[in-house]
Image (cartoon, grey):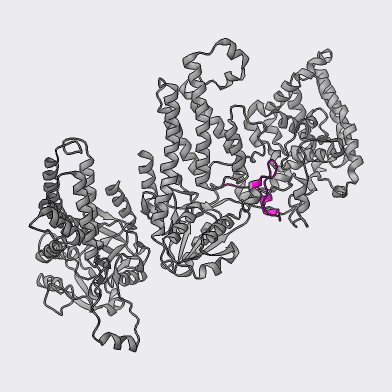
Amino acid sequence: MASTTEGTATAGAQPFDIVATYNELLRSDPDLTMPIAAIEALVLLLTHEPSSTISETLDLLAKSTEHLKKAIANPIGLSAGTDLFQRYLITTLQRPGQLGPAGDFKAIRTHLLSNGRLFIRRAKESREKITAFGRGFIRDGCTVLTNGGSRAVASLLQKVADEEGGSFAVRFNVIYVLSSISKDIEGPSGEPEGMETVRALRAKGVPVATIPESAVAYALGKADMVIVGAEGVVENGGIVSRMGTYQIGLLAKAIGKPFYTVAESHKFVRLYPLGQYDLPIVQQVVDFKTEEDIAQQSKPQAPVDSNADRPVELPLEDSVDFTPPHLISALITDSGVLTPSAVSEELIKIWF
Amino acid sequence: MRRLGLRHAVGCLWHHFFFRDSTLSPHQAIQGSTERPSQLEIESSKMTDPVDSVPTSSPANAPAQPAPATETPSQQTLPIRDAKSAKPKDPAQTDKPAKGKDASASAGAEADAAAGEKPLSPAELKKKAKAEKAARRVKEKLERDGGAGAAGGSAPAPGQPRPPATPRKDAAGGGAAQKGSKALPPRRGSVVGAGAAVEQKKKKEDKSVAVFGHLYGQQRRTTIAGAGKEVHPAVLALGLQLRDYVVCGSSARCVATMLAFKRVSLIICHIYYWKVETNPPDLLRLSNPTLHQWVPRSPRHMTTHLSHQITYLSTCRPLSISQGNAIRALKLAIAGIDPSTPEAAAKATLCDFIDSFIREKITVADQVIAASAAQKIQGGDVIVTFAGSSIVKQTLLLAHNEGKQFRVSIIDSRPLFEGKNLARALANAGLDVQYSLVHGISHAIKDATKVFLGAHAMTSNGRLYSRVGTALVAMSAKERAGGVEVPVIVCCETVKFTDRVALDSIVVNEIADAAELVSANPAQQVTGLPDPAAFTAPPKGGKPAAPIPDPATSDRTPSPSPLANWKETSHLQLLNLMYDVTPAEYVDMVVTEMGSLPPSAVPIVHRMSTNM
């Protein structure tokens, strides 16, 4: 709130709502990931707000980022983007030369904006790179088990399927785990997340089986590998991903199947969860109730005090879990195929 | 029989060295042998001393044997016995040549006085020596317990102030050996005792645990006697504090070392520039001849001078990883000073460097670590910690001040009891503290939700090198719930990172005095008089090396420990390790000032922090 009112004060007529922009960006482009949407929103913010000094710019960014994180229920993905952008700005500004602190701020600003856009374009291209790296993992005759609505996984599978009939004729099967709680927001209502990918794969001639989450252990015997997407890759190499990924990881480990994660490197986030309940989000997955509680809940509730400082609760269908690094065989990213322990190395490279 | 044979062998060796390269007059040597009987008599007459009434062959069986600094006649037997038990253990064979020289050097004056007897041919000399040896052999046989060797006839040792130290430690003379000719007084004593050395030495070797044999290297220094005169008083004091665990803990040792070196570097700068720039008048130089020793002639001498201090410190207690890293940084800073820099500026540069090093690498780093580690503590947590880590203390206090409600369970271990300090500090601050020793670990870990550990070092393969027992705590935490629900968090400054690799706790470790395990009474200081701080502060886990020189303290012991004379008990070895290695799998997170890392990221961060 604070930053928007301040935005109004500085920009005058047109207030810039970063939260609305972020949500709008995500809605308009289904291919856009959360970190990229956040970066794009920040770039738009910079173009709208006439800041004249470096410190003012950084201050504005910090405030807007804070505001955005508070307003969104699951800020893990977007914080990866905002942190990266902020870091990028600072390193650019610290560099000596024309664009350094001594240079003309106008030039710095235009440079920042153009580079920000370049950054976004590059990030979007990273999925191509991932496909290039991940192609080798899917071999002729293998069966892949996957879940959720990850666009990176979908694009990887579809690219591999596209090559069918070409020089690399890969025939593979997919077991798609459909969640009973996660509903696809964009798609037809009531349809579980991932149905769109299932249809697309089937259209390309890939045999797809859909199973409920309860059948994962049963079906894993038929799978050769597990490939999942991630919302964020944390510092110890674990992933924050759609609810249900953790249990697939545990089962895959128990059965001895490789568990691969597909994620763009801009999803690496400076976060170190120690367990499931150490994530910076509020979600009521385990909710104990008695009959009395249910009766009380059904009554018309008093209007909840809309305190802006209170973190927004993540709805059940968007809930996430944390898969620890020891369950992950490898991370397929646009900077190569990494072991979980290499993630922290990549992150440190970015941050220092 | 065998012992006798061995003694004979060493006796030969002794003579070999003693006479071969010495300018010492044979008269002197013979006089030594003639003196012996009288002292022996003194000893045998006192043999009825209740402590020693059993005429065993071993002289060192008297527990808690005081070795007073001044040897009054009434106490004569004790010092002699002390000498007996102490000196023999000297690694005689290796040190002999140097010793011979020392002895000769100091004895030179006396020898010159009796110059008339000097011209003896080597053959005669040998003959005399043989005769003397035979005489002594007979004497020794009579004496039965090898006391003869200890009498130290030729040594003017009784006159010298023998430090009130544990005989065993003093014995090896390893520390003194490094000091070259300056370590004269104790050395000389040891030479004399060499006759009996053999059996003692053999015994001592038996007492080192074979697997860790390579760690027994040198005994720790017990006194500042024999320290080189280059060693700065501040460093001398620090050495003893380190040795007595008064300054204990990786960070504290690092800071204390840097502060001592700050004082040293002031002097180095001073002398160095005085010489180079102002060229002191000859008169002044003559009036203070020792100054020559101090004057470094090139910038390299500054590091050389520093290395004297470092050598001294390492003889008091092996240097910690953090100390090593700090010293490396300091040497780099010294090397970076332009020789043409004016004195004041150079001093200021070095002092600034040391100050900022302490501030950046320890003080501020600790604050950052505490702040980020405290975030991991949530209301209702039960935090288990091991021994007493200053950074863990800071973290827990910070979390408490933030209003979080949590319990702390401290697991402690003998013989240092470092956790007592922590328990008191936390309890005083109002935290709920549970204190148990390491054997109660399965109970303590039962309701733990998080484990916080301090570190001595983190190795490049991500393993934690910390106070012995840490691995046990980490492993118990992981064992309990399949390794997911009880996270093990290590708080560690990057100055404690090392590029070494540790695969086990055997190859690299530190062995403390095994006698620390024996003493039943709470830890006391060994060197010097009882420190008032040691009584006001809770026991610092001091070093109660076996015989405590202060008679008062030994009186305090109501009943001696059953292990009191473990050195004489055959088939019994004591092992007092200082550190162990926790595998990386048991560590979930390393909190450093550069962020939280998985253990696997330690080498990367170490590389970055040293390159910067």
Q: Nearer the viewer, residue B73 or A18?
A: A18
Residue most extreme to the left: A13
Residue B527 is covered by the magenta coloring: yes
Specify the quadrant that holds the C terminus of chain B: top left
Task: Report the side of B123 relative to B602 (left or right).
Answer: right
Residue at image point 12% right, 61% down = A21
Please state the extent of the stretch shown in magenta in the rendering.
B509-532
Q: Nearer the viewer, residue B469 or A162?
A: B469
Given the current orientation, which residue lies at the most extreme top position?
A: B282
Can residue B569 be seen in this snapshot?
no
Residue B536 place in picture, x, y as percent:
64, 51
**Relative vertical location of residue A133 with respect to residue A248 in this rendering, above or below:** above
Q: Quadrant of residue B388?
A: bottom right
Magenta stretch holds residue A297: no
Q: Which SS type dominates the magenta stretch?
A: loop
Residue A46 as seen in the image, left or right of residue B500: left
Image quadrant where residue B234 sits: top right
Q: Quadrant of residue A321?
A: bottom left
Up-down relation of residue B373 to residue B266 (above or below): below
Nearer the observer, A299 or A234: A299
Tell me how many marks there are: 0
Does the rendering let one see residue A6?
yes
x and y, in percent, of residue B491 in the image: 44, 54
In which quadrant of the rendered image does the N terminus of chain B lie? top right
Depth check: A246 or B126 in front? A246
B105 in relation to B7, above or below: above
- Where residue A115 appears, as percent x and y from the top left, is 14, 47
Q: Position of residue B192 (x, y in %)?
A: 78, 31
On the picture, is A175 further left or further right than B397?
A: left
